[in-house]
Every structure is written in C-alpha cells, then in structure tokens.
Amino acid sequence: AQVQRSLDSSTSVHPRALIGRRIRKELSLGAGTESNGQGGSPLSEQDSGILDVEDEEEEEEEEEIPGAQDLVDFSPVYRCLHIYTVLGLRDVFENYYRKQRRKQARLALQPQSNMHETLEGYRCYFNQIVGFFVVEDHILHTTQGLVNTAYVDELWELALSKTIAALRTHSSYCDDPDLVLDLKNLIVLFADTLQGYGFPVSQLFELMLEMRDQYGEILLKKWTQTFRQILDQDNYSPIPVATEQEYKNYTSQFPLQDPELDKAAFPKKLPFSELVPRVYCQIKEFIYACLKYSEDLHLSSTEVDDMIRKSTNLLLTRTLSHCLQNAIKKRNVGLPELVQVIINSSHLEQACTFLEEFISNLTNVPPDTANSTQLYGTSTFKDTRHAAEAEIYTNLNAKIDQFLQLADYDWTTAAQGGGAMTPSDYLTDLITFLQSTFTVLTNLPGKVAQTACMSVCKHISNSLLQLLLDPDVRSISIGALHQVNTDLLQCESFARAGPVTGYQGDTLILAFSDLRQVPYGVDGLSIPVRCRQSLWSDRPRYGVDGLSGQTGPTVSPVPYSVDGLSLLRKVPYGVDGLSGPVRCRRSLRSRTV
C-alpha cells in the first residue's frame, strides 16, 4: 500500500515521465552474504528471485527522467520475498501478494461518484491506475516469479474493461465540449503511458472514437445557441461600408465575389446583412473544434477529413437549417426581413465551395477524392431560400385578405345612369400597398419577384370570385356587377403596368382571366362566357339593358362553368327592365331537370 501511494503521488506530477528510460539502481537488501560453503544465508538474493540492477550514470543529471525505482521504495517487497524464500514459503508470499494486489486494483479502479464534474477527477482516477500497473511492471521485471505476465495481463484486462465502463458512464454526463476535449487528451496521455509499458490500449482509442459522436452532439447544441443569438441580433439590412478598410474587414471574413461592388465608390452597401459573415466564421470555428478532437487519435488524413465533413453536414442540415427555419416562421418577421433572408441564403450557398476548400486545406485531402463526403450546404441554403419564398407568398396573401375583409359591396345597388365608376377604397389601398411592396421585392434574385407577383394577382382574382359566389349572397344586382367590373379593371391596370420586370406582354393579366370570364355582357358584364359558348354563333346572345342579337366568332359548345352557372342564378330577371340571359337560363333549367 505504501508503494502504491508513493507512486500515485509521483505520477500526478509526472504522468508521462515513466514512458522514458528507466534508471535502475542497485538494491541492497542486507539480508545475507554470498555463500562460501561455510555459513551465511542458505540462498543468495539472486536465488531468491531478485535480479541485480545496475546504476546508469548520466552526464546531464538535470535532464534525467526518474524511473519507478527512483519514486518508490520497493525494498519491503524484496525483503519479504527474500525472507519467505529462505523459509521455503515462497508460494505463500506469492499468493498473498497477488491476492492483496487484486484487492488494491479493485480499489484503484473504483471512480469517485463526482468524477465527471472536473478534469481533476479524471486525472486522479488515471493516476491511480497508472501507478498500480507501473508498480506491477517493475515487480515483474525485477523479481523472478512473484508475478508473471499472465497475472499482469489478467489484471490489465480487468482494469481495461472497468475503466472503459466508468469512462462511458461519467463522460455521458458531460455537456461541456471543452471538458470532453480535455478528457480526450487525458485519455490519450493515459493510453500512451501504458502503451509504453507494453499494455494493449486499442480499446481506449476505440472508446475515444465513440466519444467523438458525443463530442459532436455537444458541439451542435453549443452552436445552436450561437446561431440563435446571431439570428436574434441581426437587423436584416444590407451592411453599410464607409471606408476601404471596413470593406476589407468584411471581405476577409466572408469570400464575397462581386467585381462590380469592388469598383463601386464609397460609401456603399454589401448585399447581405451581418448575419452572413458571422455565420460563415462560426461554421469555420466548428470545423476547427472537430479537427482538435481528431488530433493524436492515430487516424489517417482521409479518416479525419471524412469525420470533419460528416460533422459539418450535421451542423448545416440540422442545426443551422433548423435555426433559419425557426427565424423565418417568427410572427414579427416582415417582408423586408424575408427578402434579406433570401439574399443571405443565396450568398451562403455560394460560399459552400470555399468551405470545401477550407476543409481540404486543413486535412490535405482534395475535395474531389473518390468516396469523399460532400458538404450539403448548398441544399440546406436552397431549402432555407425556398421556405422564405413560400413565407413571402403566404404573408402577401394574408395581407391581401386583410384588405379584402374591408370590401363592402352593396349587392343590391342599382346601376348608375352615367359617368365612370370609381374603384372601391379598399382596392385602391391594396394596389398602393402592392406597388410599394414590389419595389422591395425587385431586389430578390432569380424569379422570386415574378412568382410572388403572379401569386398575388391570382389570389386577388380568386378572392374576388369567391365574393361573387358567396352562398350568403343570394342576389347580385347589375350595379354591383358594374362595381366589381370597375375593381377588376383597376387590378388589370396594375398588372398591365408591370409591377416587376421579367414579364412579357400581358402575361400577368392572364391571372385575372378566370374572373374576367365570369361576368360579361352588360357593358361587358352579365353573361358567363362558358354559358355563352354553349350557344351557337349564329344565334343571338341575349344580354341586358335591351342588348341582344350580338354575334361573335364561332365557338364550339363546351360544358357549363360551375362558377358561371352559380353566378347566373344570382342575376335577377327584369332588374330595371333588364331581361337577363334568357337562353342560358332556359338551358340551365333544362339541364338542371
């Protein structure tokens, strides 16, 4: 026990010193003299199984690395072995020694319950184990038979299994990546020390590879908080740059490739917000953290490269993607912020190639190496961009619905005798809002603005159509149809003005084609087109306001439009002396029967 405590204390100061050269000293036991055939000890020390150890003189004593015999006094063990050998009870002492050392091994292998809280707890645990086996190794090499290789190997197998089980249990409680990294380095030191004494430690390195996954999960949790903080602090506005030095600072943090912006005069604005360089730098910091864990694990450069890329993919596809999606779904995110999210995502997507090069430079593995894992950053940022685009469409439609809730059509109003009708107030405000909104959306890349504009126009058209077909509206006067037609003309005028670039001709107006086909005939308003198309071209088309006998180009009979027939039922007969679309009504009645 005294030997064990002495060595434990010494190894806590010099945990790796015992790997080096062992300085052997002569053991003077004084238990007998050399036998001369006339008396003295019946057995010499060599016969007792104690080997002579010669001194090694070093010229540079200051550089000497102390060995086990310099740190521990082994003389009590040697004396006992010599005495029991002389008494012919060597087997008794060997059995006693091994039994006691097994008990001591179990004590040394029992970790403290709070070992996982600090690195010092792990260090003390490893020092106990190292001290025990250094003592056994020294006894193995300085005695004959007190312990043998099979006995030491048996103890090491026991120790290795218990040590790995203890480390698995206690390391699972750790949620600090720095502590896990320090623990890994301590295990490497522990394994290298014992490997220097010939003990197999491959299972310890396998354990560290298992801990790598745990370390990666802890890193992901840490970076989740980091990304959330960055997203919360971002103002979602382009970065203003007043001087060349500021511009160089930002371009050193993020690989911006824009020759036109490089030539632009100061002050100028970077297209992305502060989020982009900060996120890019944090991704690189995560890669550095993964690289630190892979050091000293005896891994090839290809294995390290694969490990880093897989961990980075988890960061991009799970952690960062989830944070960006949550930021997009927040209620207080407006259209300008969503537009900036799309711009930011586009630039981060373009920077993924630079991340590939960054990892390759660290691991010395070309990115085009066969079976090399590719980063999924491109797909991650594409998904983010698409989610932001969908949110823009949803928000715009929701805003349109708010305006449409203000629509207050009088479905029984009479037709005006003359003069042009003015658009509804709610629609005028809606058009003004859309014009200012699409001024912002023109900065979006690709066809996002065009898609948003078409989506808005279709939503307005469908919403107006649903107002006409509302079951609660049982009757629609000709005056109400005139008002709807005026509002429709206003919408078509907005579409014709081209709120966004990229549309050719009247493409955008086609969004209102379905609504335009429903009311038609009264000054271009009352007869549903599909109902009219069921009439032959050589037959008069009956309208209202006394209009009839209008002929047009030949059209083939087509099935009635459900929307048109529903609206037709609501147009009354003889409103202000108006006749209504008689033939369509008769056809409707006959088909209904």
Image: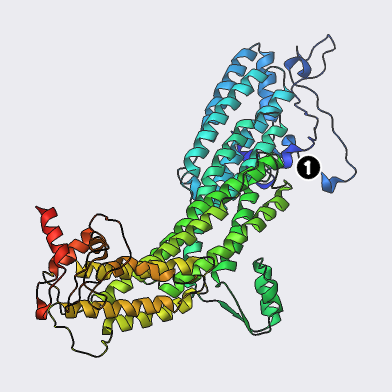
Could you say where residue 388 lies in the image, as x and y percent from the top left? 44, 64
Query: Height in image: 17 above or below 401?
Result: above
Name the side, left or right, on which 341 lies relative to 136. left
Specify the quadrant of the image occupied by residue 248: bottom right
* Residue nearer the viewer, 294 or 157: 294
Name the side, left or right, on which 392 lies relative to 120. left
Query: Height in image: 499 above or below 309?
Result: below
Mark 1 is surrounded, within 10 Å at the Cα level, by few (under 14), some (14 to 19) or many (20 or more) other residues, namely some
Query: Height in image: 308 above or below 18?
Result: below
* Residue nearer the viewer, 295 or 64: 295
Q: Residue at x 28, y 84 (%)?
A: 423
Q: Amino acid at mark 1?
A: Ile
Q: How many marks?
A: 1
Could you say where residue 503 lies in the image, as x and y percent from the top left? 49, 70
Query: Height in image: 185 above or below 588?
Result: above
Q: Which residue in the rendered view is the most extreme toward the top?
A: 37
Specify the quadrant of the image occupied by residue 589: bottom left
Q: Residue at x 57, y 67 (%)?
A: 276
Q: Quadrant of the N terminus?
A: top right
Q: Which residue in the rendered view is the most extreme toward the front?
A: 538
Name the side, left or right, on which 160 lies relative to 526. right
* Residue nearer the viewer, 127 or 268: 268
Could you say where residue 512 lies in the image, as x and y percent from the top left? 34, 69
* Residue nearer the viewer, 340 or 422: 422
Could you say where residue 578 lies in the image, as x and y percent from the top left? 12, 77
Q: Which residue is mark 1?
A: 65
Q: Kindly state the secondary structure of the residue where label 1 is placed.
A: loop
Q: How is this picture coloured?
A: rainbow
User: Visible in this render: residue 546?
Assistant: yes
Q: Which residue in the rendered view is the most extreme toward the right?
A: 59
